[in-house]
Image (cartoon, coloured by chain):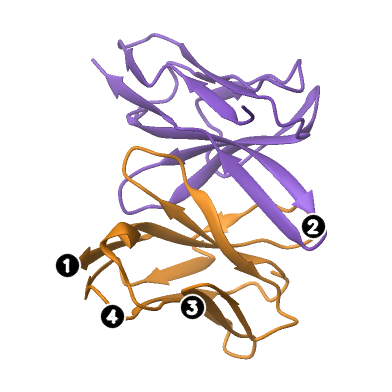
């Protein structure tokens, strides 16, 4: 059973535009929601993460928006750059140290 | 230079053969993980270990085995029972600092079947 659904599967954005990737989860016990960034042929790296006690978290050009009632969270990349071209994964876990459940991934391409 | 190393980068398996993927970390993390990555399917958990000499099955453990004899090492064996082993395999370790948990991933091993 797919517990974290991510969309879109792929996204093309012009340089300077806003990239938005969405995730929805089913398990209301999830309490940690990270986003990972993966470049081709490399392992993923943590980009930004949020816990449900806040509705938004911003780090530089990257923002997570969290809607607990809708069981959705999204990643916004402001002023998207070609160097942001990568695959992005949302994830969720419950209890500290719990297993991460990953979304299917979004392949982002930022055109110059 | 701290991090996670995986070897080899590419691995070829013949029919009926068991192969072992290496994962080593010098981050002093207790928890380690193995994931399988296939196009369009995200990362799926194969096995994980919270502490030395202990490990648990993940979501797709059939056809795989692991050991955790040392804190630094978490090798994954792909057995002949795994009928579709072609994939990108990622090892990770976990760090917890206050409210933030970070999984640090290695560079991956791409397994191909001859």
Q: Are labels 3 and 4 on one chain?
A: yes
Quadrant position of residue B81: top left
Residue tagged 4: A17
Identify the mark nearer the N-term, 1 or 4: 4
Q: CA distance from mark 1 to mark 4?
A: 10 Å
Residue A77 picture location, percent across and down: 41, 74
Which numbered disc covers residue A11?
Answer: none
Rendered orange, the chain in question is: A
Please, is residue A90 above or below residue B71 in the view?
below
Rendered purple, the chain in question is: B
Label 2 or label 1, whichever lies nearer to me, is 1
Residue tagged 1: A112
Q: Is residue A34 visible?
A: no
Q: Chain of mark 2?
A: A
Name the residue: 45% across, 32% down.
B107
Residue A108 picture location, percent across and down: 29, 64
Q: CA distance from mark 3 to mark 2?
A: 22 Å
């Amino acid at each position: 059973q797919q517990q974290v659904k991510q969309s879109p599967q792929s996204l093309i954005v012009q340089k300077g535009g806003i990239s938005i990737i969405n995730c929805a989860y089913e398990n209301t016990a999830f309490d940690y929601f990270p986003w990972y960034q993966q470049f081709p042929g490399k392992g993923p790296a943590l980009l930004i993460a949020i816990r449900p006690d806040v509705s938004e978290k911003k780090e530089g050009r990257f923002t997570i928006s969290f809607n607990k009632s809708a069981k959705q969270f999204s990643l916004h990349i402001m002023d998207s750059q070609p160097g942001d071209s990568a695959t992005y994964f949302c994830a969720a876990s419950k209890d500290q140290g719990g297993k991460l459940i990953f979304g299917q991934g979004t392949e982002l391409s930022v055109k110059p | 230079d701290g991090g996670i190393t995986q070897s080899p980068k590419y691995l070829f398996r013949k029919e009926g053969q068991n192969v072992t993927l290496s994962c080593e970390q010098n981050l002093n993390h207790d928890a380690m993980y193995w994931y399988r990555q296939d196009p369009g399917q995200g990362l799926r958990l194969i096995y994980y270990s919270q502490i030395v000499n202990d490990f648990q099955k993940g979501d797709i453990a059939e056809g795989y085995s692991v050991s955790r004899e040392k804190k630094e090492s978490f090798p994954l064996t792909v057995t002949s029972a795994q009928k579709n082993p072609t994939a990108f395999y990622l090892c990770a370790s976990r760090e917890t600092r206050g409210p933030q948990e970070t999984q640090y991933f290695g560079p991956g091993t791409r397994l191909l079947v001859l």
